[in-house]
Amino acid sequence: MTSISDYMGTSAVVNVKRAIEAAKQHDEFHALLALTEERALERATKIDETEVKGRLAGVPFIAKDNFLAFGAPTTAASHFLEKFNAPLQATAIEKLEVEGAICIGKANLDAFAHGGSTENSTFGPTLNAVDKERVAGGSSGGSAVVTALGIVPFALGTDTGGSIRQPASFNGVYGIKPTYGAVSRYGVVAMASSTDTIGCFATNASDAELVMDVMAGRDSHDATTLPDFFEIADVKPGQKIGVIKEFMTDDVDADVKKSVNNYIDKLKSTGHTVEEVSVPLLKYALAMYYIIVPAEISSNLARYDGVRYGKRAEAGSLSDLYGKSRDDGFVDENKRRIMIGSYVLSSGFFDAYYMQAQKARTLLINAFNELLESYDVLIGPVTPTPAFKLGEKASDPIKMYLSDMMTVAASLTGMPAISVPSGNTNSGLPVGVQLIGQRRSDAQLLALAKSLEESV
């Protein structure tokens, strides 16, 4: 693994060439869908020639391929956008480029970010960075793997229900899901607009702090963005931390629980108080998520019809054009979520399902707010198990959805959550611990993670 500091004080051209060569050497992991080699080298040359240097001058990075970016098509790992060249760049990428960072490629993902393993990519799965027989996690699996392999020191991802945190845990890197609205979603292919967040993968907490500090802040193109509240801070001593009881059940893998308990011991040894807490409503969180999110997906994907842009099928009528284009352009998981979403939004079921899920979501938000009045941070596993084998859950959507049971709550409540590497299983698979905080406490979560990183 590499860190941002490894690239400082070195020629940007040298850095970019080094990263591109590393990407080509690790091609068997299928973590990248495209390299933006020509544009990256042009930018690197300009950075080397200018005296204006940003905080990330000459540092290469990779973006998940649902970020609009110049230099390669933005496919969202789907046939629909296979040849779509973005007319603009995502705000997050623009902010990084202002500071001198250089995007060298686009990472693989589950098509339209629908999935938890990166097996739903139209272009084939990404392999886990530690064990090539296992999944990378998803939907931001490619971004996690390029970071874990040391191709780049950080990569961008999106997290709607765990899509950064879960692959970060599976590959042994940091994964940051910020407070909802902390980073602009402008220029990123939408999945579920009320839970989509823009975050990053990094190999250490300091790098994650820097990247999030650069990307955070208000954007006139995204009305949901918050005023810039992210400010790198020192850790608050003697914090009160709650271990979520519902996340530490007998259904959780023994190695995962052991890893969480080891992290708890570190917290205690550095002066923090740790107590068990309970959020009974968590047993309904997954059901809430898989009603609300498919509803938003069905609305957001309605724009892909074969008319305005993207894949267009041969058809004799307008209705056939819509149907055939969508049938060819979407993978099975896309279609499944559209059907679920359309069903819960339909007449007769809107009140029974969608509205009830939204009411339950409000109760969950209130429960977390109340708990976080007494505790600084909540802790638990990221997922019930380490990375599972390729194909193990691909044929059973319910088993795949259950992998999200510990990550969806932070997404539904809009709270920041990070996956912190916390060791390996007996068989050598990485395991992450999840830290959750009150809205706008992102910097404090990272400061806490950094303090433990430095104490070991």
Image (spheres, rainbow, N blue to C red):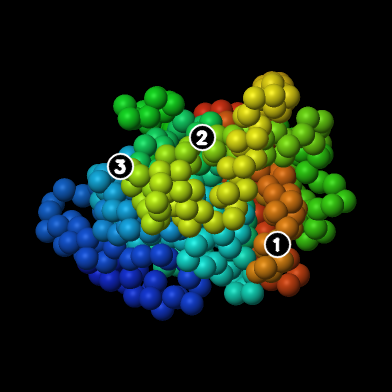
The answer to whether residue 164 is left or right of residue 367 is left
Report the front residue among 27 and 111.
111
Report the front residue among 383 and 89.
89
SS at circle 3: helix
SS at circle 1: loop
Q: Which circle's residue, 3 or 1, is located before the other in the chain?
A: 3
The quarter in which the C terminus is drawn is: bottom right
How crowded pointer 1 is (Cα within 10 Å; few <14, some 14-19, many 20+) is rated as few
How crowded pointer 3 is (Cα within 10 Å; few <14, some 14-19, many 20+) is rated as some
Instruction: Point out residue 41 in the picture as x, y percentages from the top left corner.
Output: 21, 64
**Residue ID for mark 1:** 395
Amino acid type of disc 1? Ser
Kindly indicate whether the residue at mark 3 contacts the one at mark 2 (C-beta within 8 angstroms): no
**Residue ID for mark 2:** 299
Q: Is residue 100 visible?
A: yes
Q: Residue at x 64, y 74 (%)?
A: 133
The answer to whether residue 127 is left or right of residue 264 is left
Disc count in the image? 3
Instruction: Point out residue 312 in the picture as x, y percentages from the top left corner.
Output: 37, 53
Report the front residue among 74 and 378.
74
Residues at marks 2 and 3, CA–CA distance in whole angstroms: 29 Å
Q: Could you say which quadrant of the image residue 331 lies in?
A: bottom right
